[in-house]
Image: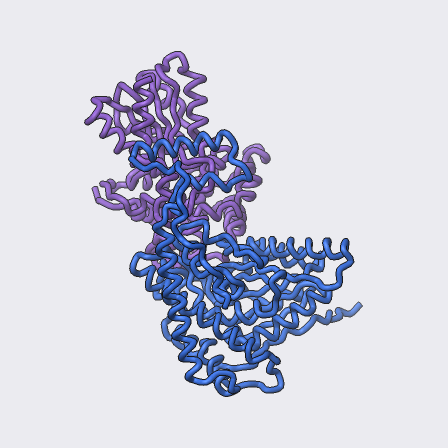
Amino acid sequence: MVEMNMAKAINLALSEAMTKDPKVIVMGEDVGPDEGVFRITEGLYAKFGGDRVIDTPLAESGIIGTAIGMAIYGMRPVCEIQFSGFDYYNYHQLESHAARFRNRTRGRLTVPMVMRAPYGGGIRALEHHSESREAIYAHTPGLKVVIPSGPRNARALLHSAIQDPDPVIYYEPKACYRLFREDVPEAMETLPLGKAQVVKTGKDITLISYGASMRAVLEAAETLEEEDGVKAEIVDLLSICPLDTETIVNSVQKTGRAVVVHEGPRTCGLAAEVIARINEKVLMYLEAPVVRVTGYDVPIPYFSKEQAYLPDADKVLNAARATLGF
Amino acid sequence: MPRTPIELPKIEYLSILNEHGELDKALEPKIEPKGLIEMYRYMLLARRTDERMLLMQRQGRCGTFPQSSGHEAISMGSIFNINKDDWHVPAYRELAGLLWRGWPLEHILLYWNGFEEGASPPEGVNDLPVCVPIASQLLHAAGIGMAINIEERAAKSKEKKVVMTYFGDGASSEGDCHEALNFAAVFNAPVVFMCLNNQYAISVPLSKQMKNETIAQRAVAYGMPGIRVDGNDVLAVYQAAKEAVERARRGEGPSLIEALTYRVTPHTTADDPKRYRNEEETKEWMLRDSLPRFAKYLQQKGVMTEKQLAELEEEIDAQVKAAVQHAEEMFKSDELLNPLNMFDNLYVDVPPYLQEQKDELRDYFKTKGKDWSNPQKKNVDTPASSRK
């Protein structure tokens, strides 16, 4: 085991994947000698050279569009979009092409690529650098969407994403890049895409989240246990598409209560989908309506007020208590 | 049939006041002394503001921001050619122009310190706010130009308004840039596209951004005039922009001006250029700074004495200091810190579902002992225009 932060764990996964498979190509803005604005591609340009670590012109649609061509040819491009706030430029290439090639060619042409992008708030970044729009991708048939919450699952999920035969959006909660360290095993490991993890078992209520909001959920669960004697079960979704219905409904069937937490806007956010699946499968087991703690339906405010927008432990705690007291 | 060459316009490079302060008298634009002083004032104000913000950022008193030092001549030399009712569509290194247009200095500080209020343009000018998503503003500029044409054709008006818009060398790679130039050309929109070619898109040098020699030559492909000018020569920028603005006003359509400079600063305060470029190169370009050569020109021309230049420095220092102090009071004011205002400007009215979310956040703060729901007393003065 080696202790590292999430930034380092993602960097490690990239380096391992490139070493293992010469078809893995890293491309994006400033990923070369600058090693990425968050230093996620540290050491890669020096180790693998300019043919495999490509500084592209400043054009997100260009990055994703050419990566699709490379992937069809047989490469495994891993694209870095500098901030998720700029991936709207390339959304068209993902929606109209990456997500559809397999389907429209009846499996003849496939697009095994990954788009990585830092997303989410909490680091006092400037405008367009803090949004959470993962639901857009989850809403796009043909894409898989993966969101790690810590160093170990970040590394394992990135390996799985790169090895996956279809396009994967790998959203990195940037607030977690250097927030904490965790033991990561020496040997390469993967995690199945589309599978959630029960990170803490409990019987009284299920708290469901992913990405940076997992920190708020873990903190709230601790308080619930200490102050209320409540044992919360915590589900980390890890993949928001495909969504692991089984793990969600099994937990809620057991606890009868749930709170779903994410920082993206509420309307048509992931919580809406999670709750729909709960209603479809285990409505009769519910002891209380399922509550959402989410970002509000406004652009995330500039950083002087972003904390008010983001879910925090107290918001989760209030929601959990309301659910428990229903 | 033999292959026949197709004649294409040649691209010129314009320099009037070179890096040694030498003037090409024949090309010197005629600007009133008052105008020259005004241009210098806002270039200096932008430089000193930028420097102060850097200090503040290092002390944790300002957020991450892209420095504008080294781009003052491009912004000021071009914007000086337009009127209040013309349109200014900036990218994010046009601080001199924003201040000259009357954006309160406090708004600049508010914007980069995480307050939306800083993005609200002052009354009396047609300005769009700073635009972070690269090159996207250029399409807005083209659209404004198209609207000007439509309106003026309908009103059979003679004097055409113009649009002055800005983008960087990196932005020239974005599809939006290509689309904007093409739209503007096709619809003969009165737009001046000012490219701040500072040779770096964060770490990526121009040579890795494009294969063409100049950005200006792309104008030929779109069917508009293009020129490259010395971006540290405010007179050359002024002259090229003047000609482009006059063309646009005459109804002859858009122009592309590539102003060549160098990003002597990091991309933003979060960037470290030592990782990707040679400091010698930076030092060499610092010697070509626009401000000292312009100051020398003003002195040689007898427009300003050394004493007057020193007095202006003092005056600007006081102006920046006062604005910083005022802005820092604003940062702490309940009026601006009220998180409930995040709901108020999304639509013309707050729809019921959003009001519910607003109430939810209000109640959440009440559980924390803070009641944001009472109308907040206005506890700071509205900042004044930075235009003297």
In the rendered image, the residue lying farthest to the right is B1
Along the line of sight, which residue is nearer the eye, A237 or B230?
A: B230
Color encoding of the figure: by chain
Q: Image height check: is B248 above or below A279?
A: below
Image coords of residue B155 (percent x, y): 76, 55
Along the line of sight, which residue is nearer the eye, B96 or A144?
A: B96
Does residue B163 show up? yes
Along the line of sight, which residue is nearer the eye, B25 or A140?
A: B25
Image coords of residue B57 (percent x, y): 34, 59
Along the line of sight, which residue is nearer the eye, B314 or A48?
A: B314
Q: In the rendered image, what is the letter of the chain coloured blue?
A: B
Q: Image height check: is A196 above or below A92?
A: above
Q: Is residue B244 left or right of residue A315?
A: right
Task: Tell me the shade of chain A.
Answer: purple
Residue at x-position 78% and y-position 70%: B2
Residue at x-position 29% and y-position 60%: B59
Image coords of residue A136 (percent x, y): 49, 36
Q: Image height check: is A34 above or below A112?
A: below
Q: The N terminus of chain A appears in which quarter of the rendering?
A: top left
Residue at x-position 40% and y-position 45%: B377
Q: The C terminus of chain A appears in which quarter of the rendering?
A: top left
Image coords of residue A34 (percent x, y): 38, 59
